[in-house]
Image: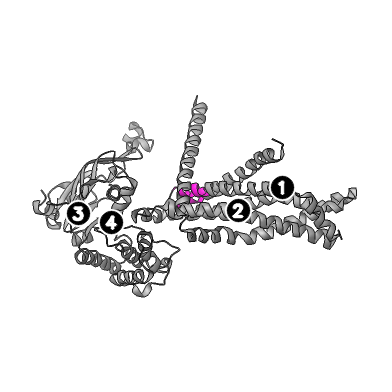
Amino acid sequence: MPAPELFADPIVEAKDVHFSFAQQSIYRGLNLLIPRGKVTVIMGASGCGKSTFLSLLGGRLQPSSGQVLFDGQSVAALSNNQLFAMRRKMGMLFQSSALLTDLSVFENVAFPLREQTDLPEALIRILVLLKLEMVGLRGARAVMPGELSGGMQRRVALARAIALDPKMVLYDEPFVGLDPISMGVIVKLIRELNDALGLTSIVVTHDVVEGRAIADYLYLLGGGKVIGQGTADEISRSTLPEVRQFMNGLPDGPVEYHYPATEYRRDLGLTPERAAR
Amino acid sequence: MKPLAALGRWVLAALARLGAAVLFLLRALGGSVRVLPRFSLVLEQLYCLGVLTMLITVVSGLFVGMVLGLQGYYQLVNFSAESSLGLVVALFLVRELGPVLSALLFAGRAGSALTGEIGLMKATEQLSAMEMMAVDPIVRIIGPRLLAGVLAMPLLAAMFSAVGVLGGYLIGHGQFGVDAGVYWSSMQNGVELFADVLNGIIKSVVFGFVITWVALFEGYHATPTSEGVSRATTRTVVTSSLAILGGDYILTALMFGGW
């Protein structure tokens, strides 16, 4: 059971969320709370719907039933203007970084400031340089995104995500495809930014080591529900077979290795008589 | 029954896609109105869609005009009517070839580029990132492009026709010795401002609108994979080319058929 003091004032709450996509059921009664001011990691196997949660939270998808609440408001019930107002309080780091490829690093970070505020150019310049300094890329301001490594692109995207000083930052698979050094840098940045700027961070990942290292609280999803939750140590001590299989990376366990298929011998055209021979 | 069911499914899917395209157009028109105060965004796109398509348009216009000069002269000289060469070249270009050929070039050069750009922005989550930054891609990305497409097309068609007339003159006067004064004055007397020039402009505005609509819709609804973007780009060129040629017939019938 979650520690009560951690969840006295949750920033996000999912209440009995059901969601299907392309006739496939992704969530079957998802319930979770995201504590304010903490780094919460949502883990699960690929395809279990981790990133979908971020889309539901950002209002880009709507649940079939149930509610996702941000600051007590149901995201799906918001009008278009309210939704955009809510998104101004959120930053999001996409798996592909999603930098605008026709703009320089500086202009990418300046983009939300130019779009959402009427700040004078001199102030925008200072703000952008501040954010770029935080991610160590002030010197790369004039470079185009295509000229940067994947790790650096992700850092620029992180600077852009925090450009408007959001209350919460969503990270979609921030560790995928990074070399160990870049990975270490991103892990350090997520923690430092969260604590220094007083953010709430939600990190969606399937990387167990990094997820455990960074999490104040951890959820494990499987079968469209939360199958394990707690601090990293609590999750590690769990005796639930689903949790143990994921955390220890075991090929055999409750999560089947094989995609559902017809009986193997029949698929190969072997009749029972021929198989017996 | 199976072929009938398949036909039914195909018709339903086509109707659903048409409905989606119309709904998208309504949103795009709203986006175009909302982006008007930031006209610099439209100017940027006018450069990408218009200025960058100018070279192919001008060169094609020159050659088409020269061919018209050649073919026109060969036929007219049989009736000793080579003095009408200027009129023939101008009417062909202003009424038909200018709007239609420049639109086909625009579909191939700018339409496919638009679909590819928007499709890739979708595939690389740039559109999603904008949404999450509380920036509406319909206003920031689609609106300026729709306006720029509609503005660029008549300008390109006018350039195509103007350069074509010059090409016809180069051949008629330079190669065959048609009198320069006769070439230009036959055009001046025979080409009507409203019946010919204005109708040609209306055609190119309609074509510009349709091409940009198709290109933006295909890009915005492309499956976000390399194959999906490639298919969408192909569909843009095929659909908009057919729409140009079919639309040209309807517009010509309406404009010059005495309806």
The residue type indicated by label 2 comes to Met
Q: Which residue lies under the disc numbered 3?
A: A247
Q: Are marks 4 and 3 in contact (CB under 8 Å)?
A: no
> What range of the chain is rendered magenta?
B215-232
Q: Are marks 4 and 3 on the same chain?
A: yes
| Looking at the image, residue B28 lies above or below residue B56 | above
Rendering coords of residue A46 (x, y %): 29, 50
Q: Are marks 4 and 1 on the same chain?
A: no
Label 4 crowd bin: few (<14), some (14–19), many (20+), radius 10 Å: many
Rendering coords of residue A183 (x, y %): 28, 65
Q: Is residue A104 left or right of residue B175?
A: left
* N-terminal label among 4 and 3: 4
Q: Are marks 2 and 4 in contact (CB under 8 Å)?
A: no
Main SS class of the magenta portion in the image? helix
Q: Which residue lies under the disc numbered 2?
A: B153
Q: Rounded to the nearest whole Å, what is the CA distance between mark 3 and mark 1?
A: 75 Å
Label 1 crowd bin: few (<14), some (14–19), many (20+), radius 10 Å: many
Q: Secondary structure at mark 2?
A: helix
Image depth: mark 2 or mark 1 in front: 1
Q: Residue furthest bottom?
A: A139
Q: Are marks 2 and 3 in contact (CB under 8 Å)?
A: no
The disc placed on residue B196 is 1
